[in-house]
Amino acid sequence: MPHAQAPASYRELLRIPTIGRILLGMALSRIGGSMFGVAIVLFTLDRFDSPALAGLVTFASVGPGLIVSPIAGALLDRHGRARLIVIDQLVGAASVILIAGLALGDALTPAILVLVTAVAGLTAPLSSVGLRTLFPLLVPRRLWERVNALDSNGYVVATLIGPPAAGLLVQLAGGPRTLLVIGALFGLAAVVFVRVADPHNETESTGKLLVDAWQGLRYTLLNPTLRALGISLAILNVGWGIVTIALPVLVLQRLGQGEAVVGAVFAVSGVTGGVGALLAGRWRTQGRERQMLMLPMAGMAVATAVLLASPTLAVLIAIMAITGFLNGPLDVALFTLRQRQTDPAWLGRAFAVSMSLNFMGYPFGAAIGGALVGISIETALAVAVVATALGALVAWWLIPRTPRRQGVAGT
């Protein structure tokens, strides 16, 4: 008689070779990225006193990478993941250090700041997509919920450590020196990933990079589930992009607190997000992903509406705690559903396009938030509420009740 399969567990997951090194490199990279997201806004507000420029810089840090993501996905499928992740970490380190050096030499202009940030953003999908596609190749299907919970918690840990560290460092040491620390983190992450071996994976390729990229875009857009995830999450992230700009302005200018408080407020969502993700990782998500996506989105809209009605520090902390917790099951359901709906031969291209579609709203939200905050914080938060609620409605409407995986492009 065959032995019954042991229950899935986090301990079993961590026994998989190289997973520990990947999780360490992921943590360093994401902490650096989380610090950068807060530090660059605080740095821009302090140096140029312009919320609109802060929104534009945030857009530049993400937008170019989203545009080239189909090409990044094709490169990942053709050339492996670890070495391209290393390249992105080195580009990020060099760009951040360059910004810091120019600022310390009093040679940084708004145009140069936007340009260098955009260059760094071009290679960002190599890390974000590369990491996300390593997991389904290395981890057995029965452990996907567990690894996706740890993947989500990678962002949670980054949110818990990065923003408070960035806020405190900017307040004590200044923006340029904080950016130097972030550059060092990216460099250390590159060193960790140098010794990660790429798992073997069969892929479908025409041998032509642009054709492969186009087919990856077509594959994703013709898949009803991946297309629905892209549209609904993009709309949701418009709201989050607005909040990313509105929250620091609210804390610094309306509530009269310092940069360290900005980081601490973001960290609250990391604490509760970790709890939510670990709990969700213990659930069997198959067949329940639609509800696990839609209900947290709706809850986030309600929470942001409460902040709009009462923008005090206590309410802000409570709202960040609630939205962080809700983001846990949302992430686990999103990651697992996307893995189930993607043929392994198309992981790089499909994930690159899907993740870029998901995140597309964030840079636009940041740019919109920078402009709206100049009118009023209440206007910015109201638009964020509408975008978040609309994302929930679109998820309910478009995500198929019984998704079926698409095998090859165009079918």
Image (tube, rainbow, N blue to C red):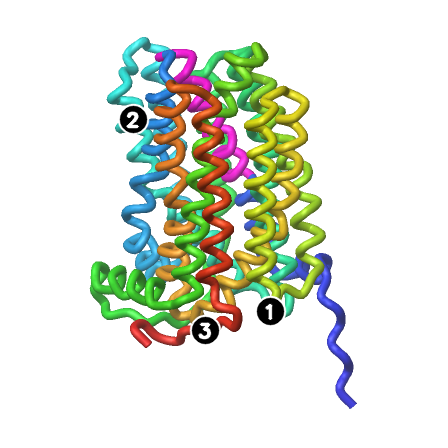
What x and y, as percent, mark residue 14? 67, 56
| In-front residue for pair 129/289 | 289
**Circle number at residue 358:** none
- Left/right of residue 271 with respect to residue 49 in the rendered view: right
Q: Which quadrant would the N terminus be assigned to in this image?
A: bottom right
On the image, numbered disc 1 is attached to which residue? 287
Vertical comparison of 263 with 143: above or below: above
* Circle 2 SS class: helix
Tag 1 near tag 3, CB within 8 Å: no
For disc 2, the neighbor class at 10 Å (few under 14, some 14 to 19, many from 20) is: some
Marks 1/2 in contact by CB < 8 Å: the verdict is no
Alpha carbon separation for disc pair 3 and 2: 40 Å
Q: Earlier in the sequence, mark 3 or mark 2?
A: 2
**285 or 129, which is in the foreground?**
285
Q: Judging from the image, what secondary structure is the residue with disc 1 in?
A: loop
From the image, tell me which residue sits under label 2. Answer: 114
Q: Is residue 371 above or below residue 288?
A: above
Magenta span: 28-48
In magenta segment, residue 145 = no
Rounded to the nearest angstrom, the CA distance separating label 1 from label 2 is: 43 Å
> How many numbered marks have been drawn onto this rendered protein structure?
3
**Residue where numbered disc 3 is placed:** 405
Q: Amino acid at mark 3?
A: Arg
From the viewer's perspective, is the residue at label 3 or at label 2 nearer? 3
The residue at 57%/13% (across/down) is 255
Can residue 94 be seen by looking at this rendering? no
The amino acid beneath tag 1 is Gly
Disc 1 and disc 3: Cα gap in Å?
13 Å
Disc 3: CA contacts within 10 A as few (<14), some (14-19) or many (>=20): some
